[in-house]
Image: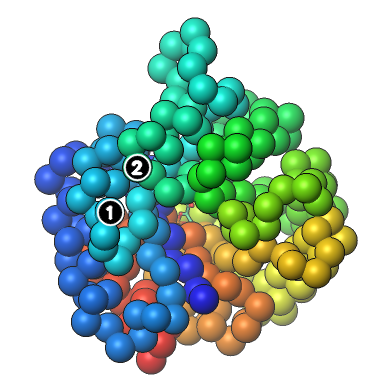
Amino acid sequence: MKYFIGNWKMFGVPRSISILNKINLFISKDRNRKKYRVIVTPPYTLLETFSKKFKNKKIFIGSQNCYQKDHYSSNTAAISPYMIKKVGAKLTLIGHSDNRAEGDTDEIIKNKVIFALKNNLKIVFCIGENKKQKKNKQTLSVLKNQLTKVLEKKFKTNNLIVAYEPIWSIGTGKIPNQDELLITTLHIKKTLKNIFGKKTPPVIYGGSVDGGNVQKFKKIKEIDGFLIGGASKDSKKFIDIIKNYYR
Ligand code: PEP
């Protein structure tokens, strides 16, 4: 199973549902539809309506983040995994570099993972090195650290997806070369094997994926799908990624 996950970030109002309607129509007619799963993470404001609208459809709706507490608390503007689950969302991103940049530490991220799993949300756990770390050849140690600081053997791997997102690639149009990406993906898989044993979670790639470069990623069989930012806000661009992947 491959994953195509769209992260809308700070984008979307109620009428933006038309983007998802078009993607849903494409999937329902696509002969390859059984080979992949589409998930979209709109902002919190749209979670409930979109989750309801797409309840029995081909697109799964998830959140872009969650708060590090389980249920209710007195934290202004915070949204807990419990609240996300109760409006019908199936999943949440955790540890996106945007949120790490705004203060999410490994400890905070770990709490988010624990409470999201407790509330039966699937998790897309994001990791990735920045430009300086890449330049200093620290990529592999940074990734290992990010994984081992948060993940534990007791976590259920069937509710977990790991997204490798090099920060220098997000929104820049730059992508890792094939050798680099194969090495990092294998390294992530090996680290996950050391943590979980046999049954490891899928590993997807994120960072400037579009219809023009997705074929390059296809060559690396170890990549189980994609986290797509910019190109997920336009139905044609998103559909092109799926179409070109299976070309
Ligand atoms: C992202 O922010 O998760 C992302 C992958 O963005 P983009 O596809 O625009 O690089």
Q: Residues within 10 Å of mark 2 (few under 14, many from 20)?
A: many
Residue farthest along the top direction in this orientation:
74
**Residue 201 spot, x, y in % from top left:** 67, 63
Compare residues 24 and 178 and report the one nearer the observer. 24
- 33 vs 170: above or below: below
| Residue bearing the label numbered 2 | 88
Q: How is the image coloured?
A: rainbow
| Residue bearing the label numbered 1 | 55
- 18 vs 174: above or below: above
Please state if 41 lies on the left or on the right of 192 as rendered.
left
Decide: marks 1, 2 in contact (CB < 8 A)? yes
- 75 vs 164: above or below: above
Please state if 30 lies on the left or on the right of 205 as rendered.
left
Compare residues 44 and 100 and report the one nearer the observer. 44
Give the spatial CA distance, label 1 vs label 2.
Answer: 8 Å
Identify residue type, mark 2. Answer: Gly
Q: Which type of secondary structure does the marked residue at label 2 adopt?
A: loop
Residue farthest along the bottom direction in this orientation:
247
**Residue 226 spot, x, y in % from top left:** 50, 66
